[in-house]
Image (cartoon, rainbow, N blue to C red):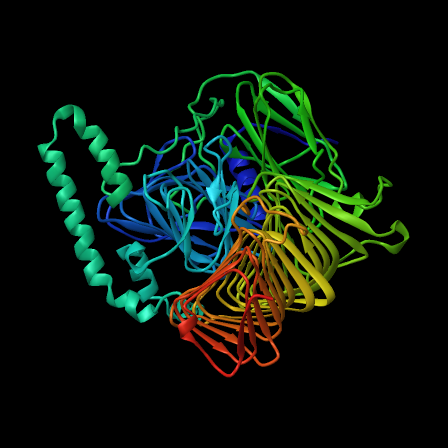
Amino acid sequence: MKRILSLVICLTLLLSFAFTANAANSAKATTIRLGEYTGAVSVTDAAGSSKSTNSKMRLYNGYSVSTGAKSSAYITLDDEKAIKLDANTSVKVKKSGSQFEVFLSSGTLYFNTTAPVKKTGSFKVETSTTVTGIRGSSGWINEKMVALIHGHILVTEKSGKSSGISDYSGIKKRTVALQSGFAVRTVDDGTEESKAVFKLKTGDFTSMVLEEIDTNHDLQKQINEDGNFSAEELIASIPEVKAAEEAAREQAQTDIDKATEEDKEALIEAIAEVTGTGEGSGDTPVIYAPVTEETDSSGQDDGGNGTGGNGGSTDDLTLYFPTGDNFTIDNLTVGGLSVEVSEEVTVASGSAVSFDVYPSEENSAFTSDFTVETEAGSDLEMTWEGSVCTCTFTMTESGSVTVSGADLLMHIVQNDEDDMAASFGGDYGSMIVVESPLSIPEELGSKTIVLSGITMLVRDEGSFENCVGFELMGGSAIATESASFELPSVTVGEECAFVIDKGSTVTVSRIEDEGTVMVGTSSSLSFTSLTGSGALSNMGTITTGTEGSLEIGTLANAGGLSMENSYITVTDSFSNSGSLAASSINVHGTFANSENCQVSVEALSIGDPEVGQGTGSNDPSFTNLGTVNCTSYLAVYEGATVNNAGNTAQFMISGESEIMGTFNNGGTVTVNANASLYIAEIGSFENNGTVENDGEIVILGSFTGEDNVTGDGTIQHGN
């Protein structure tokens, strides 16, 4: 016989059901609590009612936490410190199962999530302008900036806010991947760093962040290993930073005292953004519809001061829930009260209803056509948190809930549509975790997995079998942690990212990149072909097989890039601050080799019109501050420029070379024995440094500074 739960029966029965639901959730959901705090800290529930504040109190979905002046508070996940709120900071907690989100409405928060988020969970911080997905990283966030001390995160600008954020190469993107020691300015404040990624400086750290570093020895070790800062120097700067912040607060208060009444409000808002001394407005409280009994939600260990409704008499309505093999309905609340899910639930008319739909298997996700329909009320809203969908509506008439399209990953591969294996959809920040081999049955054939607006984290033993590859679109991303796997292909769409990090080793035969590919420290990527107009950022190791190819719009190498027997073509910008070896490099935009860095290449071509032109290639240029060794052939075409700049710059020519453009030497150019430097009639060589010639120099065009040529080689004027 179907079980009927009525909200108008005695309080004892209701509390028992609420306790049962909460107990069931606690077994699988991330536990959020208010941790240690100092000063004035206030907590309100989802209905806006004040709660009695105490350390270790549970924070439920919709709860808000605010700190006053000279106050701070930790929020913990599964009893581990995850974030710290600075003075005058307001946040709202959003939680669904093990999916956790914090909305920062004012102030500054520090995050450190090396361990607390469960394997199947996710954690993101949202502001009015951005959404940041966080896992295994440390940093801080306010309305103006997202800063990363250690780890890696993805920062997405909310749609409609502007034309995007400039990444490391200056390309505008909606989603940028931050590396350790970098930050992104999320608002246009008139500085050069507005709406752009930039490298953090010691002066960017706040005293609250520095004090957290001072008490975290593991983080200090990670900071020193990353090499961006000295943890000891950061800690030593705390007194100076505190003094500067106090002076800024005093000056701001002085300005307020002098301001006219009509200017005070604007000044207070400015101070809140700069020094954290203003007041945050917070979100508009949710007011639930009244139920027949004024009661409290049981199972909360925060003192039991929550309110579940406003009382009053209403009509009873019946809500019918479905059952299914591929999904589970949980976390049912009616009028703000937790109740047990059954096939039939009797509720009060006008009550707000909320519930979550989970896939039945771990590491699975619903397809993008997942739908929920209800006859029980209008204005149904669905919110995605990873693979979990939260549904909310107001009960206005008796009806039923219908869940459809809830196929799981292992069922998705059974379709016969071309070679499509799976299509995942969701809001940015939604995450699928793969930490064990994911195998597509052989009888179904090889398949491609498509991600849309979702992040897939591959870690530990995560890998893919019988999979053609991945296609990323709609702001989606693949990130790796300590993973090792091979794939035939990966297609990275615009505003998407493929991040190999945390000691991962990944081999992909073919990569098409219109977004961002990033290789982190101590990680490696091996490919045969990488093409596209996107960006490639390397802080680890990149290698290619025999006769490999790399054709990319923007390339930033700070690690080791080894492409022997392979060629590189960069159409827009190429910066090298690591080590680079290749058979052939074709430059059609700008190339910059940093001081103390080495480029070893057989054939170097700058501005070759036969190969193609980049978007910024009207004046191709090659600037060297380090060492370049060209062993076979150098060609500088008409309109192109080489700048061998500075006392440390060395440019070695060990084969043939032809200058049809401009070569400016302010360092040292070496023409080795059996090598030649040929200045064409349309070319010019301006020597303000030293040329060591043990081979042959042929001058048909312009050559200045011949007196600074040394060595045992020959110089010939004319043919």
117 vs 320: above or below: below
Residue 332 in sight here? yes
Extreme residue toward the right, this view = 443
| Viewer-proximal residue among 429 and 474 | 474
Please state the horizontal and vertical placement of residue 440, each as a whole percent of the image.
81, 53
Extreme residue toward the front, this view = 718
Q: Residue at x 54, y 39 (%)?
A: 18
Q: Residue at x 41, y 65 (%)?
A: 645
Is residue 107 rendered to the left or right of residue 636?
Answer: left
Please state the horizontal and vertical placement of residue 76, each as a whole percent of the image.
42, 54
Residue 82 in sight here? no
Please state the horizontal and vertical placement of residue 80, each as a whole percent of the image.
44, 59
Q: Residue at x 40, y 29 (%)?
A: 285
| Viewer-proximal residue among 323 and 312 | 323
Extreme residue toward the bottom, this view = 712
Q: Quadrant of the C terminus?
A: bottom right
Quarter of the figure with residue 436 = bottom right
Q: Residue at x 37, y 42 (%)?
A: 194
Is residue 182 rendered to the left or right of residue 405?
Answer: left
Quarter of the figure with residue 450 = top right
Please state the horizontal and vertical placement of residue 220, each as a whole percent of the image.
38, 69
Q: Quadrant of the N terminus?
A: top right
